Amino acid sequence: MAAKLFLRSLRSLRSMNVSCYTTWSKSKHLRHVGAGLLTGFAVYGISGISVLAARNDLPNYVETFMAQPITTVEKLQKSRNSMRTKMELMVMKTQADFCRALESLESNGSVFKVDRWARKEGGGGVTCVLQDSQVFEKAGVNVSVVTGVLPPSAVQQMRARGKRMEDSVQFFAAGVSAVIHPRNPMIPTIHFNYRYFEVENPDGTTQWWFGGGTDLTPYYLNEADVRHFHRTLKAACDKHDPSYYAKFKQWCDNYFFIAHRGERRGVGGIFFDDLDTPSQSEAFQFVTSCAESVIPSYIPLVEKHKNDGYGYGERRWQLLRRGRYVEFNLIYDRGTKFGLYTPGARYESILMSLPLNAKWEYMHEPEVGSKESQLLEVLRNPKDWLLEAKSDGT
């Protein structure tokens, strides 16, 4: 009977045109399906969090995470309607789904190392890292749920973005972030980050906003891959506001810019910050849709290229491009700098975005007309990928 229910669940997912990615635990019980978690053969997606909470099913639900949430289950149940609770559950669920989707691509049984940590100033996180494996040279997926007093540097940074803020304010921040460095140069790197920030003003009022995005960094340009990636993100945006994709795509191109090189880090995606409209609930639903789009935007690209052939030249180029990745993250990335200057910062988790291996060569320039130079052309001159997709009939 259980097997029939399982097969029926999979057929139902396929009928909705949802790709399924599965891994098995040592106890041989099904742990993951890309569209949601199977717990007792009932399918739960991120959007089902409120249903689970209403059914008092939270203790079973959190067992599907990579580790126990940072806030106790008892406290989460008591505050089930607060945005803090909803966001913590969403980022934990996103982490678990993505980690298990990546694990399912490793044929040697590699799994993530799970490191749950606490921060003495308040809160903590769960860092998951997979490294030196067959498909992924290094993959990091981090959740943080932290509270405390904003340091002066952070207050100054937020004031520069137009926030009205006192010198000393309490804050809450919850987010999920990931950077995946594949071994094969034909597989692109992906980065995503989705976060919620809340500040308690001295007068008792609260300021809140969401931020985040997903972007792709290929080493070799495959335009079909890039169009697939952007189409998936646009579909997530369009469910909430048809203007979001174009606006956040341009923001992404402008943000991930390595000024001293005159080039973008990758081929873009979406990026936004300080999102506090149209309402807290609607903004959360939008961020949830973006988080749910990560697996379908990226996993098919890994499956497509993980067995592609490559040689020393391609590997050398990959390491050089990783050097550019390091430069952006350490010099320009606002999230990295905020994390490093926050009291009680956990540097191992903040720097998990850096690759195991990278390379810098003095005054390196690819040969004119080469595949490497084709990539540089779009990094220096961002393209409207979906407009091109329409024009060529795909």
Image: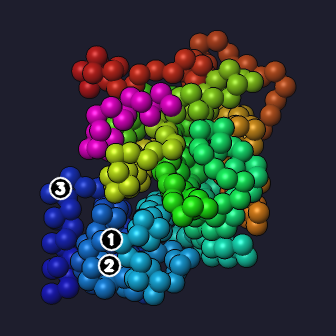
Q: Nearer the viewer, residue 26 or 122?
A: 122
- Residue 355 on image: x %, y %: 69, 49
State whether residue 194 is above or below residue 246. Answer: below
**Are the residues at dot 2 and dot 1 in contact (C-beta closer than 8 Å)?**
yes
Magenta range: 236-251
Q: Which quarter of the figure has residue 80? A: bottom left
Q: Which residue is mark 3?
A: 16
- Residue 370 on image: x %, y %: 60, 18
Disc assigned to residue 53: 2
Q: Nearer the viewer, residue 105 or 392?
A: 392
Secondary structure type for disc 2 = helix
Q: CA distance from mark 2 to mark 1?
A: 6 Å
Residue drawn 64% across the image and 45% down it: 158
Residue drawn 36% across the image and 35% down it: 244
- Residue 276 on image: x %, y %: 43, 47
Q: CA distance from mark 3 to mark 1?
A: 20 Å
Secondary structure type for disc 3 = loop
Q: Quadrant of the N terminus?
A: bottom left
Q: Which residue is mark 1?
A: 49
Category of crowding for the residue at label 2, using alpha-carbon neighbours closer than 10 angstroms: few (below 14), some (14–19), many (at least 20): some
Residue 241 lies in the magenta stretch: yes
Colour scheme employed for the rendering of this structure: rainbow
Secondary structure type for disc 1 = helix
Residue 227 lies in the magenta stretch: no
**Are the residues at dot 2 and dot 3 in contact (C-beta closer than 8 Å)?**
no
Category of crowding for the residue at label 1, using alpha-carbon neighbours closer than 10 angstroms: few (below 14), some (14–19), many (at least 20): some
Nearest to viewer (mark 2 / mark 3): 2
